Amino acid sequence: MVSEAVADPAVTRLIIAPPADGPANPDVFFSQAVGVLMRHERLDVEVAYVAPRATRATRNYGLPHGAAARVLAEDGAAQTLPLIRDDAGTVLVGYARHLGRPGEDGKPTTLHGETYVDSERLFDGDVRGIVIEPIPDLPGVRGRRERLLPGGWLTGRAVQTGGIDLVVEREGVLTPRVVKRSCYYRHHLDWKLVRP
């Protein structure tokens, strides 16, 4: 357990290797583990991610997966990066989406509202959804409208959406709770990730 490992002040590096019977998206396990470090105020601990396959988090941070990730985890050096979290205390490593409430078919409906990246408006009105990703460089997070063709990113310290019947998808997992607003922002402390 991550909580037990970080309770020991002698622990300086944590190797996160999602279990075979864990979530379908290994980034879920990764984000939860980093969230434990944040809540226990142990962001001084270096984090190494041994992803079993390529994921959004490995892409975001330029990380290898499989056997190469294990080698890096044991021998690589950590870099200090901005830590992105939301107002519910969940750490973001791969991606999140702000969406409209699911319809009767279970698919998200159109999101009606507005999104700002820092003080710059990303959209106002109706949109399919908003995609949010952490980035390794300052200011730390970026957002764009969800569309078939990628692009149109705005970067900042925070991405905030307010709307009617808004739901949040974190690392591919849709949260059933409907909210009026959601914000992803840079935590006041950075974290240490082992990277190439």
Image (tube, grey):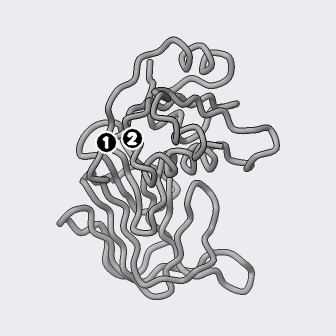
Q: Residue at x 36, y 73 (%)?
A: 161
Per the image, label 1 sits on a secondary structure element best described as loop
Which numbered disc covers residue 190?
1
Snapshot quadrant of residue 44: top left
The residue depicted at 54 percent of the width and 16 percent of the height is: 72
Q: Is residue 137 above or below residue 114?
A: above
Q: Are marks 1 and 2 in contact (CB under 8 Å)?
A: yes
* Number of residue marks: 2
Q: Quadrant of the C terminus?
A: top left
- The residue located at (63%, 46%) in the rendering is 29
Say which quarter of the image contains residue 172: bottom right
Asked whether, in this view, residue 112 is left or right of residue 186, the answer is right
Residue 168, label in figure: none
Can you identify the residue that label 2 sits on? 43
Disc nearer the start of the sequence (1/2)? 2
Q: Against 21, is 74 above or below?
A: above
- Residue 45, image x, y percentages: 43, 33
